[in-house]
Image (tube, grey):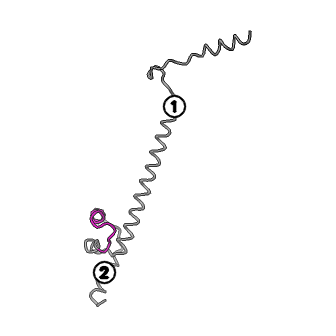
């Protein structure tokens, strides 16, 4: 590594600032374009090193996957709750099903007691 590339490396590696909105948008575009080839992203994200880009990718992806998993889990719980509520409440008129006739049961009980 010559002196010039060493200084360039030190300058880019020293960027410890938070990612800006512009960098985030560019990052998403570059991931779409290059996938996990972080070396190819490095020239487009000036001031960000290979390891910063790689770390950001895995942290970003992990956060997004966790967020999706939580929302998916929440949605499944809502669906199950709604299904249970629907099973607990049956509207016989709306379903065009005759209501159960409990008088036959009572008649049978009364008749069997005689």
- Mark 2 element type: helix
Give the overall secondary structure of the magenta segment: helix
The residue at the point 40 percent across, 58 percent down is: 64
Which residue range is magenta in the image? 23-39
| Comparing labels 1 and 2, the label whose residue is closer to the camera | 1
Judge by depth and name the residue closer to the eye, 74 or 23. 74
Where in the figure is residue 57, as x and y percent of width and height?
A: 37, 66
Q: Establish if 83 lies above or below 56.
A: above
The image quarter in which residue 65 lies? bottom left
The residue singled out by tag 1 in the image is 87
Judge by depth and name the residue closer to the eye, 19 or 52. 52
Q: Establish if 88 lies above or below 16.
A: above
Where in the figure is residue 27, as x and y percent of width and height?
A: 30, 65
The residue at the point 28 percent across, 83 percent down is: 8
Where in the figure is residue 3, as x and y percent of width and height?
A: 29, 90
Q: How crowded is mark 2: few (under 14 residues within 10 Å), some or many (20 or more)?
A: few
Q: Establish if 92 lies above or below 65.
A: above
Where in the figure is residue 63, as x and y percent of width and height?
A: 42, 60
The image quarter in which residue 42 lies? bottom left
The residue singled out by tag 2 in the image is 11
Q: Does 25 appear in magenta?
A: yes
First in sequence: mark 1 or mark 2? 2
- Mark 1 element type: helix
């Amino acid at each position: 590594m010559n002196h010039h590339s060493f200084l360039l490396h030190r300058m880019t590696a020293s960027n410890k600032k938070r990612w800006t909105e512009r960098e985030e948008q560019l990052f998403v575009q570059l991931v779409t374009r290059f996938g996990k080839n972080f070396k190819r992203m490095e020239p487009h994200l000036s001031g960000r090193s290979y390891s910063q880009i790689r770390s950001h990718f895995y942290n970003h992806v992990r956060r997004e996957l966790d967020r999706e998993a939580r929302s998916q889990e929440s949605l499944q719980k809502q669906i199950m709750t709604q299904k249970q509520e629907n099973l607990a409440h049956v509207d016989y008129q709306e379903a065009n099903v005759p209501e159960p006739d409990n008088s036959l049961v009572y008649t049978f009980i009364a008749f069997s007691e005689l």
